[in-house]
Image (cartoon, rainbow, N blue to C red):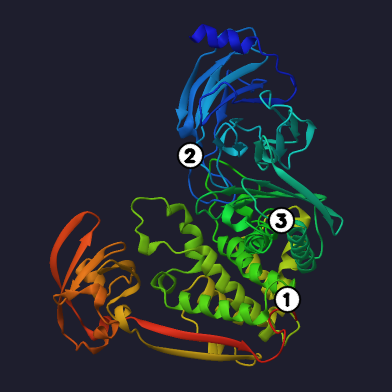
Amino acid sequence: MRNLLHLGLSLIPLRGMGEITYRLFWAEEPPYTYRVIMRLSPSKGPYTDLQMPSWRPGRYILQNYAGALYHFSAQTPDGQPLAWKKTDKDTWRIFHTGKASTLEVSYRIDARTLDAGSSYQGGALIYFNPITLFLYPVGRLNEPCRLELPDLPATWAVATALPAKNKRLYEAPSYHHLVDAPFVIAPTLRQTQTTCEGTTLHVHFWGEIGAKNVDPFLTDLCKIVQTQKQIWGELPLAEYHFIYILVPFLMRHAVEHENCAVFVLPQSGAQDESSLKGFLSISAHEFFHVWNVKRLRPAAMWPYDYNTPPMTSLHWFTEGVTDYYTSLTLVRAGLMPEAQYWSQLSSFLQELENSWVYQNFSPAELSMDSWHATSPYRPTFLQGSFYAAGKRVGFLLDMFLRRESGGRYKLDDLMRYLYRTYYKRGKGLPEEGVLEGVVHLLGAEKRKVVEDFWRSYVEGRERVSYKDFLTGLPIAVEEVEELAQGWARIGIRRWSQEGEGIRIVHVEPLSAAARLGLSQDDIIYTVDGKSAGDLDPAFWDSLKDGARVPIGWRRKDEVVDEGVLYFTARQIPRQKRLRLTPTKEGFGTSD
């Protein structure tokens, strides 16, 4: 088998001797399998190290793509085997002692995950993110790369932002550019395009799309592009690709790239022209990343190191502030009513203020803690989102700039300043760069008030009094904080009906329910001997301090004996009701 494999390799003529060349095969492979043949010159010295990325830009967790790689082998072009060994979980070392002018490497990759950042080989759907498939020679990320697709049928369609020499050959000036361009290949794709602000917008759909006319959707995408160009001051690309993978199950995931974005969304969202509007919000979020994170990005990711997790406290800025601008974009583009924007923003802020995790972890902490997300030692109640935390900071920072500058500056001005100061000068955004940008706009005399803001809301966990914070701005604030009521009084913040019981969705840590041992997905079926499903939530409001309540619950398939909940008034969580209403038309949105 080994000799046959080597013979097969040597019979395949790979071009591009001065480049790193990848050939990707799938036609004769089993489902969920890609075969890669790689040709490159050896590194200086007696060996060449090839490494597989362990994380990808846009997803700040360790995913360890090397775990899917098997059947690795190395040889010279004439079929002479080369010795190799693994030196760590991601690295293969090939020994050549100067006798080889070219290395040929072959391996297979398992590809069965269908989300916006993965790779999948399903016969009629060839979908891959190159960062999950391709090894790179250590220390040589900037060498030009070629990608050849010999198995691509002549009649199939391709969606990618990577420049093509022809349908089966693509070139990239570096590994960075190669892995920033995913591919969707299929017998049929619905593909269209439009020109917007001098940029060609390519729109690709794979899957079942019921909408017969997508022109209104393209018009709306153009409105998003125009609106965001106004925010940043320029549109730094000639072409952009929106690639939508429509699936027959519930999925809502997207990943940004320098010149494209991939979306995996339910096909029900494309059943007609009206339902396609449901894709605009996520499309606006990803397009905002053209500037925020793909170009203006933390210094910790400048340049990318795909095997060393970038330690930055700025994910709240790159993702959360982007999320803040998502709805703002839709309002400014005329795609969302202003009243709906403020209603949704109020509900969002209210939910965060009533969430234990956002009271106990700062946006900067949550940014750093992203690398803990997949740890089995990280319980659910500690998993906050830097998206949500950063969206709140985005709003507060926008209002702060308006208030402290007397209306001269807003968040748009800060974004443009950071973009010009760092990206346009070929630099990454320092950890203190956002703070220093605010000081630059407001003046050195405002440094203390800016640093106080940072200590309170970016690096700190201070609860926001919106009445106080928004004083002087044309926003009416209805804000009431009180003891929680109903099931929330014992710490069960969210729940759903489950037969004759209730299923717990979220338990407040250190609450009476948590101290009993109740947790997410437990089903409470009796309270004080009665059916939990029939219980009036007001029952909990009537409890006196020191009350004891027998509770029966089930955890998955396990039946748990009744426990006794000890109710004490000092453990009652507090909850806030919040509503923000602008008193000046267009304030905070179109002004």
Inspect the image, locate mark 1, and give the three-letter code of the amino acid beneath it.
Answer: Leu
Which of the marked residues, 3 or 2, is nearer the chain's N terminus? 2
Which element type, helix, strand or loop, lies under badge 2?
A: loop
Inspect the image, locate mark 2, and give the three-letter code of the amino acid beneath it.
Answer: Asn
| Above or below, 347 relative to 514 | below
Which element type, helix, strand or loop, lies under badge 3?
A: loop
Q: Position of residue 562 (x, y in %)?
A: 13, 68
| Nearer mark to the viewer, of 3 and 1 | 3
Residue 416 appears in the rendering = yes
Distance from disc 2 to disc 1, alpha carbons, whole Å, reads 42 Å
The residue identified by callout 3 is 290
Q: Position of residue 157 (x, y in %)?
A: 72, 36
Q: Residue at x 52, y 69 (%)?
A: 389
Q: Position of residue 352 (x, y in %)?
A: 47, 74
| Above or below, 61 relative to 553 | above
Which element type, helix, strand or loop, lies under badge 1?
A: helix
**Which quarter of the rendering shows the C terminus?**
bottom right
Horizontal side, residue 177 vs residue 351: left or right: right
| Above or below, 438 relative to 586 | above
Which of the marked residues, 3 or 1, is nearer the chain's N terminus? 3
Q: Residue at x 48, y 73 (%)?
A: 460
Distance from disc 3 to disc 2, alpha carbons, whole Å, reads 26 Å
Q: Residue furthest right?
A: 198
The residue identified by callout 2 is 64
Which of the marked residues, 2 or 1, is nearer the chain's N terminus? 2
Task: Tell me the crowding category of disc 2: few under 14, some 14 to 19, or many 20 or more residues within 10 angstroms, Cα based.
Answer: some
The residue identified by callout 1 is 441
Q: Residue at x 58, y 30 (%)?
A: 135
